[in-house]
Image (cartoon, rainbow, N blue to C red):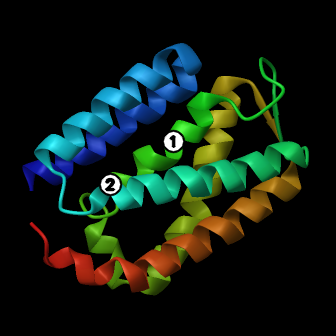
Amino acid sequence: MLGKIVNALAFQAGWLACVLGGTPWALPTVTVIVTCHLLWLGIPGEWRWLTGFALLGALVDGTLTLLGGLRFADSAGLPLWLWLLWPLFATTIQHSLTWLWSHPRLAMLGGALGGPSSYLGGARLADVELAPWAVVVQAVVWGGLCGWLALRAAPSRRHP
């Protein structure tokens, strides 16, 4: 239980460091959090989740940026701090969020509401312009992604 609490708090600390601190704080903070996570809580093969989410984040947020759905005051392309949030989220999949995957409908709803809410809150704090259509796209992406995780990650709950 302590590991799940630490995992959730570490994710929140990383999110804040990325959104409030931007690129100068994002890389060292996320590097420390992910390294400590893998050393303390990591399960065999978990690095695949982190890698997959890093690639997915580059695809999803990179595409939204190219299409004008995300506009950054201090960057023309996808900033490192935003991209790093994806593998940071992946650290929660088999730890602090394991309870969610046994409830697929709740997982989909949580993703559809939580994903865009995170972007909206982060956009206000980080001076990012977020197009309304991009919020809808994020609701669909995160709702579908969390629904998929409920189907895919559920067997992994057997790990400590």
* Spot occupied by residue 46 in the image (x, y as percentages of width and height): 28, 59
Q: From the top left corner, tell me how far across and down residue 155 is, in percent.
A: 26, 84
Q: Secondary structure at mark 1?
A: helix
Residue 85: give its label. Answer: 1
Judge depth for marks 2 and 1 and give the one in front: 2
> In the rendered view of the protein, which quadrant contains the N terminus?
bottom left
* Residue 54 as seen in the image, left or right of residue 74: left
Q: Are marks 2 and 1 in contact (CB under 8 Å)?
A: no
Closer to the N terminus: mark 2 or mark 1?
Answer: 2
Alpha carbon separation for disc pair 2 and 1: 15 Å
Using a 10 Å C-alpha cutoff, classify the residue at mark 2 as few (fewer than 14 neighbours), some (14 to 19) or many (20 or more): some
- The residue at the point 68 percent across, 65 percent down is 139
- The amino acid beneath tag 2 is Trp
Relative vertical location of residue 109 with respect to residue 79 in this rendering, above or below: below
Q: Residue furthest top?
A: 24
Q: Is residue 33 left or right of residue 55?
A: left
Residue 121 position in % (x across, y down): 62, 39
Is residue 6 in sight in this rendering? no
Where does label 2 land, which residue? 47
| Quarter of the image where the C terminus is located | bottom left
Q: Is residue 64 above or below residue 136?
A: above
Amino acid type of the residue that numbered disc 1 sits on in the rendered structure = Leu
Residue 12 position by quadrant: top left
Residue 105 lies left or right of residue 134; in this view the side is left
Secondary structure state at the residue bearing disc 2 = helix
Marker disc for residue 29:
none
For image coordinates 53% across by 17% down, the residue present is 21
- Please tell me whether residue 106 is drawn above or below residue 43 in the rendered image: below
Task: Tell me, yes or no, if residue 123 can be seen here.
Answer: yes
For the point 55% across and 58% down, the residue is 114
